[in-house]
Image (spheres, coloured by chain):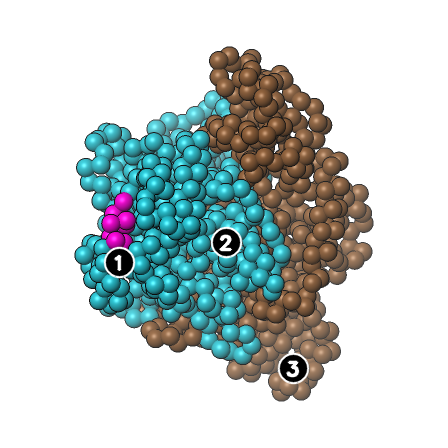
Chain colours: A brown, B cyan
Amino acid sequence: CVHLAALIDLVRFMFYPPRCDDDDDDDASCPIDEEVAKLLELKAQLGGDDGKHQFVLKTAKGTRDYNPKQMAIREKVFNTIIGCFKRHGAETIDTPVFELKETLTGKYGEDSKLIYDLKDQGGELLSLRYDLTVPFARYLAMNKITNIKRYHIAKVYRRDNPAMTRGRYREFYQCDFDIAGQYDAMIPDAECLKIVHEILSELDLGDFRIKVNDRRILDGMFAVCGVPDDKFRTICSTVDKLDKMPWEDVKKEMVNEKGLSEEAADQIGEYVSMQGGMDLAERLLQDQKMCQSKLACAGLSDIKLLFSYLQLFQVTDKVRHAVVFDLSLARGLDYYTGIIYEAVLTQAGVAPVTAEAQNGAPGEESVSVGSVAGGGRYDGLVGMFDPKGRKVPCVGVSIGIERVFSIMEQKAEASAEKVRTTEVQVMVASAQKNLLEEKLKLITELWNAGIKAEVMYKKNPKLLSQLQHCEESGIPLVAILGEQELKDGVVKLRVVATREERNSSPVSTVPGQS
Amino acid sequence: CVHLAALIDLVRFMFYPPRCDDDDDDDASCPIDEEVAKLLELKAQLGGDDGKHQFVLKTAKGTRDYNPKQMAIREKVFNTIIGCFKRHGAETIDTPVFELKETLTGKYGEDSKLIYDLKDQGGELLSLRYDLTVPFARYLAMNKITNIKRYHIAKVYRRDNPAMTRGRYREFYQCDFDIAGQYDAMIPDAECLKIVHEILSELDLGDFRIKVNDRRILDGMFAVCGVPDDKFRTICSTVDKLDKMPWEDVKKEMVNEKGLSEEAADQIGEYVSMQGGMDLAERLLQDQKMCQSKLACAGLSDIKLLFSYLQLFQVTDKVRHAVVFDLSLARGLDYYTGIIYEAVLTQAGVAPVTAEAQNGAPGEESVSVGSVAGGGRYDGLVGMFDPKGRKVPCVGVSIGIERVFSIMEQKAEASAEKVRTTEVQVMVASAQKNLLEEKLKLITELWNAGIKAEVMYKKNPKLLSQLQHCEESGIPLVAILGEQELKDGVVKLRVVATREERNSSPVSTVPGQS
């Protein structure tokens, strides 16, 4: 049994031992957790398939709620990502969820049809934001900001065909990091890739590959292969489909649908099959045909420079986390003007959880399971908003966080470790009846001391149900009040996992407090 | 001069000294900051009034961007609030920004006209959420959850007349804390008030008053005063205007517009002028007329019980932070069924910043400057979504965070202390040319060691501009590379505020690292 002051010290001691590495991950798992998890799962299954009554009771198509467990995972992922952004010195901004419709007009090419408009209820015509990049450019132009390094984490909206099991929603988070400003070539660009590399490594999602290309190389390639100028964009979006369909089908679309000559298509086909590193960029700079295009040469030189910076950043020469110069990478959005990149996880399905599995032979199942990050340079976008057309060069990256959530959720499901959804440290409980007043007094002291504490909202709860609540929600300690303890002016502290009852404390018991 | 390993240790030592209270507030201010702040303000003024060109360059009416400074304040406020919610053991959820239109239908009475609808682009009819309470109730019913304690911080949307200088927007944050479940009377209700009290005290917004009433007392009062049943709601919303207009005008509206008898109005007028504590509830329980209504009696008994719990929670008997039973409090929303409350700041204008001013005589200017929190019990709302009408009793509170932001921003403006918008610890700089490679190598080591570091994106920036950047953004340390240091395998570490250059380190210099 311990006195109040000692109780507070004891709780603090258990949660904040006098080391300095008390950042986030705590909650050691206990055997009871597993049992509780099984029961909870069973409960969820029983409650979950009662579909016939849910007539209006749903969220809008392509959207979802986050339950507390999902929120706990989301918070963890955000902390990792924000931690990285802050380590790189980024500020953050926020913009409204809707913009004037005209702000979004003409920025997304064919994808504009996926924009959500608001109903005209009088006043301005509005649309939900489609990404965070266009609002960022609008913000820069509006505030005449010419350099900033900012991150922005917020939801964006696309009337797309949702595939929610694969993490594709109509409302989804983007985590954007962008560097705006007139700087020396490829330094900010390389930092964006460094950031992708850090985040994907830290999130521990298994092997990944970062593909890099440059819009100027693509345009130069199209030119030297004989694609007419006005077909650059449309051929580019056909090339973009190479990660989803084989070259034969892409070629067919180019020739049959887009009216390209078979010869030009074949030449493109040769180039877009190329992958490599700095060496490939060097080789292409010597390429008879490619070097006819000044644009392509500029892009290739920058790719070389980029790889040299990536080496300094310790990002290249990793087998399992490779950066690859890939001429087939095109990316859909219209606004890119220079370097573009995309990160894909290369392990089929969920990344393995156990350490043994992670040490297994890499590359065997190197199937692309989808993009988790992407971005590039867009030097013209801010100028589209500036009344005088003043340009602000920008480069940025967007982390496709919904796919990351899906993977983390699956990992959590597969793992034995329980996800806690609260951070409660102590449950204030009683063994006998009529102690509500005393419990409320005690919990007030705990709250005032900054301790995370709960009490049941019943006058006379059963001790068993109080202890059960602790086990269900992973509360590690119970402060139990009883007549005898009250008489003695002490509190009994019980460790839920071991069921041992502590009556020692790190500081010697302080007398005279109740 | 220090070696790399020692540098990392030194930076860590300066930011995380071996005490354990390293939570958030750091950034000591330096004299240069003030000069820089003045220049920045001047720059903002010069850049800000170029209105003629900003044709489309704006955010939607009633909405705003948050710049990095505002975001820093927002983060701090959120941390305080979330800290309190977590201390009380709340989980968190998230819901989509839009709901099916019918989900919102019939929940907000007259205010429904302020709901934003989405354009019908085929598919479901959607509306932006108007608050977080209705989506919460929908979530509970949809997932058959009968008890939960959750918080939810997110933006909501109202096509209201914005008054942005007073913190009233069309897009604004709500911070909601709600307790759902069948519990013993007034325990969760009292905890909601405890939370309001903790948050407003911690945010240090000056004096405040929490007004408390009960819908059952209002309805009972209307009944005993002779208001016809079908006029309860409309008379209630007239009473709600008492905080904005004098009784005479309210009475006029009741009699002339709503057709109430003058006698009934006068009787109401007597009751709604009453304010007090537990004593008032006791007195009204003895009131000949009032005690004719069972509903009112139930409400009054619960008010008594509430105050007894508030006493245990140490929330009452504060002069500057009073809880008052106020019969004029009505609150607009239809869905409340029991206790209701609202917190108002009672100091005109911004809360004083200096400690001396805060110790000045309170109450002199006790003018209500607006509601900063409100809530109540809504036992019927979840049942409206349940196919079988099963009720889940709920009580909750919503913090009006936008007003808090406004006040905090004004405080920050008035204060000499500079708001930092990044957390960068070290700037990696060079005194000579051609050291980009070495700088990138060094910053990579720092990032990999978890240190927040920046480097300029120029091959050969001037030392002055590197130092200037540190002063502008409050970076406390500079690691300066030079030819000599490179030869010696060391780094020079400079403290920006004092300009002293350190060459000692908390650990003895480690040999053999570069």
Residue A254, numbered label: 3
Amino acid found under the numbered disc labelled 3: Met
Badge 1 crowding class, 10 Å Cα cut-off, few under 14, some 14 to 19, many 20 or more, is some
Disc 2: host chain: B
Disc 3: host chain: A
In the rendering, at what x and y percent does residue B62 appear?
Answer: 33, 63
In the rendering, at what x and y percent does residue B227 appear?
Answer: 32, 60
Residue A420, numbered label: none
Between A10 and A373, the residue placed more toward the observer is A10
Amino acid found under the numbered disc labelled 2: Asp
Whether the residues at callouts 2 and 3 have beta carbons within 8 Å, the answer is no
Task: Identify the mark nearer the N-term, 2 or 1.
Answer: 1
Secondary structure under badge 1?
Answer: helix
Question: Would you say residue B193 is visible in this rendering?
Answer: no
Per the model, the C-alpha gap separating discs 2 and 1 is: 29 Å
Q: Residue at x 37, y 50 (%)?
A: B292
Query: Label 1, on which residue?
Result: B264
Question: Would you say residue A235 is visible in this rendering?
Answer: yes
Between A105 and B499, the residue placed more toward the observer is A105
Q: Which residues are magenta?
A: B267-274
Disc 1: host chain: B
Judged left or right of residue A81, residue A319 is right
Judged left or right of residue B249, residue A12 is right
Query: Label 2, on which residue?
Result: B379
Badges 1 and 3, same chain: no
1 or 3: mark nearer the eye: 1
Badge 2 crowding class, 10 Å Cα cut-off, few under 14, some 14 to 19, many 20 or more, is some
Whether the residues at callouts 1 and 3 have beta carbons within 8 Å, the answer is no
Q: Residue at x 58, y 69 (%)?
A: A56
